[in-house]
Image (cartoon, rainbow, N blue to C red):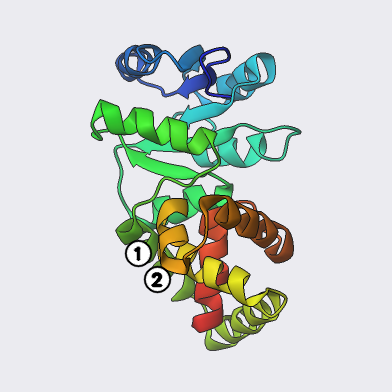
Amino acid sequence: MGSAREPTRVVIVDDDRLVRMALRLVVDGEPDLTVVAEAADGESALAAVAEQRPDVVLMDVRMPGRDGLSTTRELLTRPGPPKVLVLTTFDSDDLVLGALRAGALGFVLKDTPPARIVDAVRAVAEGNPVLSPAAMARVIAAATGSGSAAARRSSREAARAKLSTLTERELDTARAVADGLGNPEIAERLHISVATVKAHTGNLFAKLAVENRVQIALVVRDAED
């Protein structure tokens, strides 16, 4: 996926035709990316994904009928789901949290420069979350700061039980992920190879029963709350 032989397949979902056209121009301008379908609403998006089996869906949040968050939730219940990158004009903790809870792997504003949108598509296609350390910190703070004291205590105990199953190096890796570091930065911090970081991260997915790095970070923050 994402190689010259097999470009990353992208479906664009947005109710604004001009936005879809602009995104298609940006994405199709890259040799390793290709737009295989467009959709103007959630129902059309579900049909397009079922037919085209894309690698990545660029998903608008607010659309008539089925919105982007419910569409994302539905997509990710299906076998072999695509990675979802939420693209919106709205920037709020509620929307970011809603997108991540729905299963999206990234969140990018529509006024993001085209080159960064392309980079975000590539990152999500590789399974990497697209949230800056500052954005991740804000989301984690909002997620772990809500709810009753009893609920937070329960979450903390559950998170600590999960972390107790990790080796020392896996725990160090999890904490680095929670700090918003990428694999090269984690390798430098822990004085290990990037390949070893990837191996530790794979173990974290299995042991913590999570699907992406943002969820690893949430477990770490819950344990420290």
Whether 61 is drawn above or below 5: the answer is: below
* x 67%, y 57%: residue: 205
Whether 118 is drawn above or below 169: the answer is: above
Observer able to see residue 67: no
Kindly report the distance in space between the C-alpha atoms of the residues bearing marks 2 and 1: 5 Å
Image quadrant where residue 78 sits? top right
Looking at the picture, tell me which residue is in the foreground, 155 or 149. Answer: 155
Looking at the picture, tell me which residue is in the foreground, 79 or 16. Answer: 79
Image quarter of the N terminus: top right
How packed mark 1 is, by other alpha carbons closer than 10 Å (few <14, some 14-19, many 20 or more), is some
Q: Secondary structure at mark 1?
A: helix
Q: In the rendering, which numbered label is found on residue 208?
A: none
Q: Position of residue 106 (x, y in %)?
A: 45, 43
Looking at the picture, tell me which residue is in the foreground, 59 or 126. Answer: 126
Q: Position of residue 169 (x, y in %)?
A: 60, 71
* x 55%, y 67%: residue: 174
Observer able to see residue 189: yes
Q: Position of residue 46 (x, y in %)?
A: 62, 24
Tell whether label 1 touches label 2 (CB within 8 Å).
yes
Looking at numbered disc 2 in the image, what kind of residue is underneath it? Ala
* x 59%, y 56%: residue: 196
Q: Is residue 210 left or right of residue 87?
A: right
Image quadrant where residue 126 sits? top right
- Residue that protrudes farthest toward the right in the picture: 79
Q: In the rendering, which numbered label is found on residue 141?
A: 2
Q: Secondary structure at mark 2?
A: helix
Q: Position of residue 122 (x, y in %)?
A: 45, 31
How packed mark 2 is, by other alpha carbons closer than 10 Å (few <14, some 14-19, many 20 or more), is some
Per the image, the residue denoted by label 1 is 138
User: How many labels sit on residues?
Assistant: 2
Looking at numbered disc 1 in the image, what kind of residue is underneath it? Arg
